[in-house]
Amino acid sequence: MIIREKEPANLEMPFRELDGWITPNEKFYIRAHFPVPKIDLASWRLKVEGAVKSPFRLSLDDLRAMPSTTLPATLECAGNGRVFLVPKVKGTQWELGAVGNAEWTGVSLGEILRQAGVKQNALEVVLEGADSGAISESPKPAGKIHYARSVPLGTALDGVLLALEMNGAPLTPSHGFPLRAIVPGWFGMAAVKWLQRLIVTDQPYNGYYQTVDYAFWQRDATGVALVPITQLQVKASIARPGMNEVVAANSTYKVSGAAWTSEAEITRVEVSADDGATWSEASLGKQTAPNCWQLWEWDWQTPARTGHYILKARATDSRGRIQAMERDPDRGTYEINHCLPIEIEVR
């Protein structure tokens, strides 16, 4: 794993090591805002409170006794690819490997909320982790805060898994033990780790990681508004060749990677070996599932002429969304889903 930060640990998979639809646990990226909290299972409880008729608490044994389900889902850090932004921006300097696809096993958040009896005026559910710390950059609140994000009530009732296992194994501390949220089709900032509270609210949640951080400027007929980052954007990334790799001239090279989107299927991936001047269609992998990446590959007949070349990949999904060629500056330091240049040498 590539260390982007030592403490708190922020690690990414070398993306050129992509070799299967499921990312092994030991290669799955790790994102943390604060140090991993120490969890005492004897006293740990998941608290369900707020705009509910019957607040209650669940132990780990209670959760394990509930009906479980397993689903695959791709998580991508909202800042994945940030190192490609010019000029350099603040934030963890992820390259391409802050993304992974895993099978998650756990219980339905909707089932827990139905047991609690959500009140009619409820709007959102806040997912709060046990991790906490002080924010270093202004604007910021004073003192320590917990990491927390919210999801709309409809999503919480039908589209969120509270995961106990990852790829058939119990969650490790770095991946959120004992419990983390999985919001399929959303960026990883919604997959809150070390869950300790579910707070049903009757007002929009305006927490730090919902407004000051993990937000972008959205333009519509009314003007410009700062809104929370939510769903994954259509995107294809090149795993091989890697940046600055040397490729043999006048040969066949299998360019490969993965593509993903939200609430749709990847229908096409194209690859350009001349910085976007011309495009060729890649072959899509057979293994697919909702809100999961799809592997792809393309046999590139490398030119006889040696020199510097720029590869790009572009994805299209079943809703007709096409990966952008240029960066949207309103996305700030997040949602880097334009076609990224992979510079290589042909010799």
Image: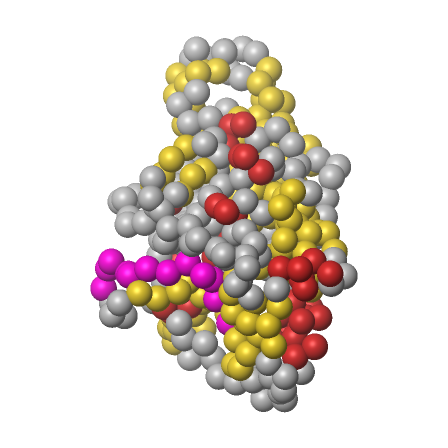
> Which picture quadrant has residue 288?
top right
Residue 232 as seen in the image, left or right of residue 206: right
On-image quarter of the N terminus: top left
Residue at 28% x, 48% y: name it: 89
x%, y% of residue 339?
47, 42
Residue 1 vertical placement versus 315 (above, below)? above
Coordinates of residue 231 in the picture (x, y in percent): 55, 60
Q: Which residues are magenta?
A: 124-138
Residue 190 or residue 146, whichever sits in front = 146
The residue closer to the viewer here, 243 or 327, is 243
Q: Percent position (x, y) of residue 119?
A: 62, 87
Q: How many marks?
A: 0
| Visible residue check, residue 125 | no
Residue 142 lies in the magenta stretch: no
Say which residue appears at 43% left-offset and 39% top-offset: 11
Q: Residue at x 74, y 56 (%)?
A: 69
Q: Which quadrant holds the C terminus?
A: top left
- Answer with left or right where residue 47 lies relative to residue 70: left
Query: How far across and how far down the image is residue 207, in percent?
Result: 39, 72
Q: Is residue 19 left or right of residue 133?
A: right
Q: Look at the picture and state if 60 lies above or below 273.
A: below
Farthest residue toward the front? 42
Magenta stretch mostly in which secondary structure? strand
| 146 vs 12, nearest the viewer | 146
Is 127 included in the stretch rendered in magenta?
A: yes
Residue 18 appears in the picture as rendered:
yes
Residue at 57 percent of width and 31 percent of height: 18
